[in-house]
Amino acid sequence: MAAEAAGRNDATTGPADCIAMQEGPMKEGNMKVDLEAPLSTAQDDFTIQCRDVCRSYGKLKVLSDLNLTVPQGHIYGLLGPSGCGKTTLLKCIVGTLKISRGHITVLGKPPAFPGHEVPGKMIGYMPQELALYNEFTISDTLTFFGRIHGLTSKETQARMDFLIDFLHLPQKQSLVRNLSGGQRRRVSLGAALLQNPELLILDEPTVGVDPVLRSKIWQHLVEIVKTGKVSVIITTHYIEEARQAHVVGLMRNGHLLAEGPPDAVMKQHSAATLEHAFLQLCQSSDQNSIQRGSGPPGGPLEKSESFESGRDESQPILGIGPPPAEKHPKCSVDWRARARHVLPKGRNIAALIVKTMVRMKRMPGSLCFQFLLPVIQISLICLCVGGEPKGIQVAVVNNDTSPSSFSNMVLSFLDNSSVHQVPLSHHEAFEGAYSGKYWGVIGFGKNFTSYLTKRILQRQVPKEVVDGGSVHVWLDLTNQQIGLMLEKQIHQAFQAFVNHKMGSMAYLADLPIKFEEPIYGSLNTDFTTFVTPGAVLSISFYLAVGLTALSFVLERKEGLLDRCWVAGVSSMETMLAHLFSQLFVISVQIILMLLFILLVFKIPNEGSLALVIVLIVLQGVSGISFGLVISAAIDDEQSANQAALGIFYPNLILSGIIWPVECIPYPLRYLSLALPQTYASESLRCIMYRGWGLSEMMVWRGFIVTLGWNTFFLILATVILKLRK
Ligand SMILES: Nc1ncnc2c1ncn2[C@@H]1O[C@H](COP(=O)(O)OP(=O)(O)OP(=O)(O)O)[C@@H](O)[C@H]1O
């Protein structure tokens, strides 16, 4: 095998034989991925060219003035210890990470250049993470990537059959989540090979793969580059297997220590193996750093520590000397290509929507949960919030001795389902009330009946008669709702008694205030009616936030977003596809919620059902957009959950959903009015309870504010995604 490799390497003298590594002062200025991006004059010979590439994560400088060249039709083995920056470099090459300085040219243009199919069909990328959808079968996985690359189903099928056979994959209907680690890695490799790309970028494809298959993969790579049109860049921890590559780049601390054919590297260092050559290079590099008084290798690199910038000519590094002078003609692109680059592609959106639908189909339990959760939540609110307290224990001390006993009559009008009367002595009643057993004490004096009669019939009575002819009530007001209910029930019972006893003369015992038929709403309006519209909006918003943030954060963590991006799916397409598929889920959720609140809990709706639905859907879209903001800004699911939960209560309280906005003190009220759900809740209440339409300001401003937040969240998510690259 080694001899074979050597033979191949001999045949690849020329560009790969001695790749120059840049020396001298570093060039200033950021990499230009715009219209002024430079083109290598020798672009026909090179598939990838990296010049003076720098990339940092915060203060950690990971790539430092790195120069690398992948000749066309070659296999390039990128080797280096864990953490030296290989994956970072590959991500810069495929365009998922932006470089802070330098130039990268891939297949003739910088990555992500308008109209360039990198990212896209020209490039096959296998990330280090498996980056596969666990709920997919092997067939679903390859079909999905086939759709994105625009392959016909016949082409996808043919490639699938070949790859399943070649990569020793199990049946194509096998679910990815049921595959072994090695099998998943091979499926991931299959997805990268699917469209026969011109450039294959493979980040540790042979980890966890048995030696027979590993050798077969290398054979295949050798085979596909033979045409001279396909190039491969591959990272591996098995340094010796890289001897089969045409060129190796030995990387350490963000620099390339050497670049050249494996045999030449070994010869230069009189090493029997590539591993030994690499060790020698590392030692020389460390000695050089110590002599120059720089910090230990592996730490953050400063410009002054850059190996290339201060390199001694005597160092045993291949290709010493500045790279040949390069002219940098500018790439140009017409407005049509630029527009095509920016505009979302229907094909990609459709592929992503189908992907989401297939995943939903494969997780029926989760889908049912998503549909039923809002119904359960709103039902619990309607059942448990705002209703009348029932079975409240009240002590009754009845000292009325009259045979006609008005006190018993008053008590008989008390609603027994709400108030449970417990007849007791004065002492027992108060002892029970103070010990928390009873919510109040209702007391009638000895002469209640006669004094009450006198109070009603005589014009003037002494204070003693007024007092003795009154129902005395002592309440435990630590629970305002129970206290208010008892007050209301006792008033109503007394009113009913007066009506019964006095008939048409009942007005004598009335206050001269008459509450007429309400202008809107009903006399029996309860708190549930107030709270339900806001609760529906809040549920739609927060479920969408949670599902969106979580699904994106997980997809990013598993490398799926990056993989799709390299396959040519833009962030905008990903967002739109998620929006459309989530709209389906939201629509079902809203239909079920409305069925329950209108038909089961009989919440009134005097207005247009269409307006109600549109407003709730728009709030769901706000939730999706806000979820996108969270997932764009946050990398792990725990922090994403915390962010979603963290804003839940402040927003719920400040939006006037559980208590009127009018109760909020002034400076906070301005904040409340700016929130996404304050005007929207008011708008929904106006539609449902007042029957208003869009001509009313209180209705349309709810829609306008919701649309405004949607736009703001979407723009913010896009900006954060761009800035964080
Ligand atoms: N998103 C990130 N944020 C901060 N630091 C990061 C991030 N990704 C990588 N790094 C750091 O950058 C350095 C290079 O990481 P990289 O993944 O490129 O190494 P690698 O050579 O591919 O390692 P391995 O062979 O183990 O995969 C490491 O120190 C790593 O901790």
Image (tube, rainbow, N blue to C red):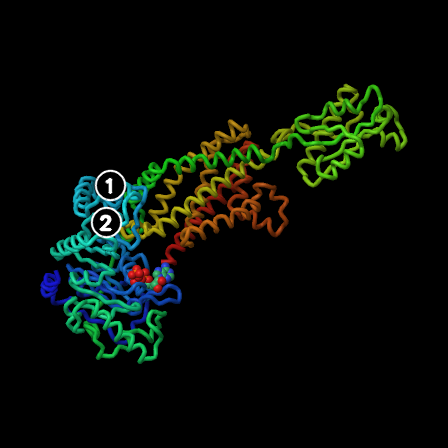
- The residue under label 1 is 139
Q: Is mark 1 on a helix, strand or loop?
A: helix
> Which residue sits at x=76%, y=28%?
423
Q: Which of 701 and 184 is in front in this view?
A: 184
Q: Is residue 568 left or right of residue 621?
A: left
Does residue 229 appear anywhere in the picture?
A: no
Q: Earlier in the sequence, mark 1 or mark 2?
A: 1
> Which residue sits at x=23%, y=56%?
201
As drawn, 698 above or below 83: above
- Report ligand 1 position as a quadrant: bottom left
Number of the label disc, if any, that sits on residue 290: none
What residue type is disc 1 on? Ser
Question: Is the residue marked by circle 2 packed among few (<14), some (14-19), or many (20+) residues within 10 Å?
Answer: many
In this view, the mark in front (1 or 2) = 2
Q: Which of 82 and 415 is in front in this view?
A: 82
What residue type is disc 2 on? Arg
Q: Is residue 638 left or right of residue 141?
A: right
> Which residue sits at x=33%, y=69%?
298
In the rendered image, residue 692, in percent from the top left (x then y), is placed at 54, 33
Q: Nearer the viewer, residue 714 or 191?
A: 191
| Residue 158 in which image quadrant | top left
Total residue callouts: 2
Number of the label disc, if any, that sits on residue 186: 2
In the image, is the residue at mark 1 within 8 Å of ligand 1 by its beta carbon?
no
Disc 1 vs disc 2: Cβ atoms closer than 8 Å?
no
Q: In this view, does 258 lie to the left or right of 628?
A: left
